[in-house]
């Protein structure tokens, strides 16, 4: 089962009781519908969605509603039925104030609309791979309605033109989680939140590991340069001409080539300061480079 199907499965069991919310739900379900007179053709992504939609549309437009079903490519379904009330709703969905008229009945109406819109037109990627929630609106006349409802909920969408219609989409985790919750799939939204948290935690661990590896690499590279410089000074006889403290540091570095600066500092008797150690190592490098 895909992640989008998990959302849909949770939405199938969500009751919609208020009259205003059932109308908003029907509007969302009909985002892929067209009307010719009283004849309505509504597109749905699967048999399960079409069966749910048939029940919801009967509850809104009359239990005697009869459907003819056509199967499309990739399992999509088209339900065809005759309903003056449904055709009227489709006409209302195209008006400039459609969002306010269709989702302004109560505070739950926008969520009911998005509930239907996700079932008919929505999809969400598996968050283990990437985050992408999208409503694909196939009928251009309904794009302003869907965009206005999403914006009124506080989530103005990004818009992309696709061959099959207009995509209203989101890629940030917080918006995806909130919208799935608003649609009514709170359990799946919590699962998504946990997955996103785990991904962030793994990312932070990887960054910390990479940083540590980089620091270790820099330390090793510096120690190799220092050791090579000391050996070059020994070979040339110049090391014995340097101050006693610098010679002490050179001997300790040769004896402890893998020691960090902090460890090397502590090996001195008595221990020297970090700045003092850096000064001595710099002197060794400069003397060696000057000789070479």
Image (cartoon, grey):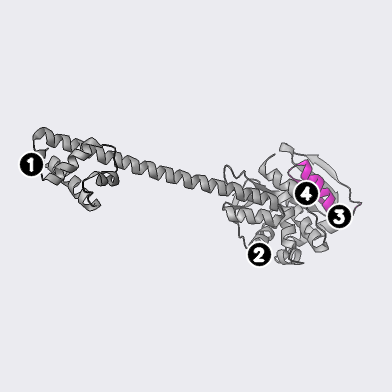
Give the SS element for disc 4: helix
Q: Position of residue 253 (x, y in %)?
A: 22, 39
Report the residue marked by disc 4.
12
| Residue picked out by circle 1 | 241
Q: Does residue 233 appear to the left or right of 95 in the view shown?
A: left
**Observer-nearest of 130 and 163:** 130
Of the residues tagged 4 and 2, which is closer to the observer? 4
Point out the residue furthest to the front here.
270
Q: Position of residue 53 (x, y in %)?
A: 80, 49
Q: Secondary structure at mark 2?
A: helix
Badge 3: few (under 14), some or many (20 or more) residues near its Cα, within 10 Å? Answer: some
Q: Are marks 1 and 4 in contact (CB under 8 Å)?
A: no
**Outermost top residue:** 235
Return the disc, 2 or 3, that comes first in the chain's sequence.
Answer: 3
The first of marks 4 and 2 along the sequence is 4
The residue depicted at 71 percent of the width and 37 percent of the height is 74
Give the magenta part as a residue range.
39-63
């Amino acid at each position: 089962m895909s992640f989008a199907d998990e959302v849909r499965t949770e939405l199938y069991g969500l009751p919609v009781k208020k009259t205003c919310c059932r109308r908003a739900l029907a509007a969302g379900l009909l985002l892929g519908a067209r009307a010719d007179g009283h004849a309505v053709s509504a597109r749905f992504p699967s048999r399960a969605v079409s069966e749910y939609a048939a029940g919801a549309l009967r509850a809104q437009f009359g239990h005697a509603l009869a459907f003819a079903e056509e199967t499309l490519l990739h399992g999509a379904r088209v339900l065809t039925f005759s309903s003056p009330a449904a055709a009227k709703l489709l006409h209302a969905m195209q008006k400039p104030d459609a969002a306010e008229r269709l989702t302004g009945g109560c505070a739950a109406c926008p969520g009911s609309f998005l509930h239907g819109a996700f079932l008919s037109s929505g999809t969400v990627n598996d968050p283990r791979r990437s985050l992408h929630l999208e409503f694909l609106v196939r009928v251009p006349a309904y794009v302003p309605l869907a965009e206005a409802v999403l914006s009124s909920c506080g989530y103005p969408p990004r818009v992309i033109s696709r061959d099959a219609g207009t995509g209203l989409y989101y890629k940030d985790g917080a918006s995806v989680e909130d919208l799935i919750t608003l649609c009514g799939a709170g359990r799946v939204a919590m699962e998504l939140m946990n997955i996103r948290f785990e991904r962030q935690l793994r990312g932070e661990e990887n960054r910390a590991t990479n940083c540590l590896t980089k620091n270790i690499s820099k330390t090793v590279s510096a120690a190799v340069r220092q050791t090579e410089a000391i050996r070059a000074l020994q070979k040339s006889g110049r090391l014995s001409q340097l101050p006693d403290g610098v010679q002490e540091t050179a001997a300790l570095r040769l004896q402890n080539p893998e020691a960090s600066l902090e460890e090397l500092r502590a090996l001195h008797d008595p221990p020297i300061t970090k700045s003092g150690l850096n000064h001595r190592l710099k002197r060794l490098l400069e003397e060696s480079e000057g000789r070479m």
